[in-house]
């Protein structure tokens, strides 16, 4: 077991309802956090960063089963 775990925190503005845009932003943060110098073991993203915070009537349109295309891309 590792004695030390590096955790990266990502904070960014999400585009409401635009999962692909938000996944692209998450990928950039993940790439940066996992580079040789940083080597993050865990990356923590904001809650609801995949869909944005005020989705209101879009909740059914944006909902996905798990696993789904979005969870596959994020993992």
Image (cartoon, rainbow, N blue to C red):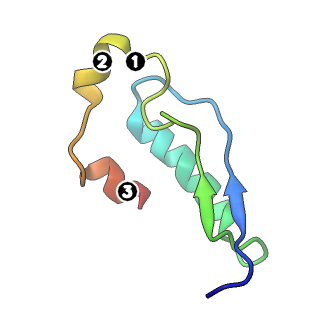
- Marks 1/3 in contact by CB < 8 Å: the verdict is no
- Marks 3/2 in contact by CB < 8 Å: the verdict is no
Residue 55 is marked as 1
Residue 44 x %, y %: 60, 52
Residue 45 x %, y %: 58, 46
Q: Residue at the spot x=62%, y=30% of the render? A: 13
Q: Which residue is mark 3?
A: 73
Q: Residues under labels 1 and 3: Cα distance? A: 21 Å
Q: Secondary structure at mark 2?
A: helix
Q: Residue at the spot x=56%, y=45% of the render? A: 25
- Packing grade of label 1 (10 A; few <14, some 14-19, many >=20) is some
Which comes sooner in the sequence, label 1 or label 3? Answer: 1
Residue placed furthest toward the top = 57
Residue 58 is marked as 2
Q: Is residue 4 above or below residue 8?
A: below
Residue 27 quadrant: bottom right
- Is 26 left, or right, of 10 in this rendering? left
Q: Residues under labels 3 and 2: Cα distance? A: 21 Å
């Amino acid at each position: 077991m590792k004695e030390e775990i590096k955790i990266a925190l990502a904070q960014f503005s999400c585009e409401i309802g635009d999962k692909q845009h938000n996944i692209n932003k998450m990928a950039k943060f993940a790439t940066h956090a996992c580079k040789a110098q940083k080597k993050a073991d865990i990356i923590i993203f904001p809650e609801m960063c995949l869909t944005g915070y005020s989705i209101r009537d879009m909740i059914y349109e944006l909902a996905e089963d798990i696993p789904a295309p979005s969870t596959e891309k994020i993992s």
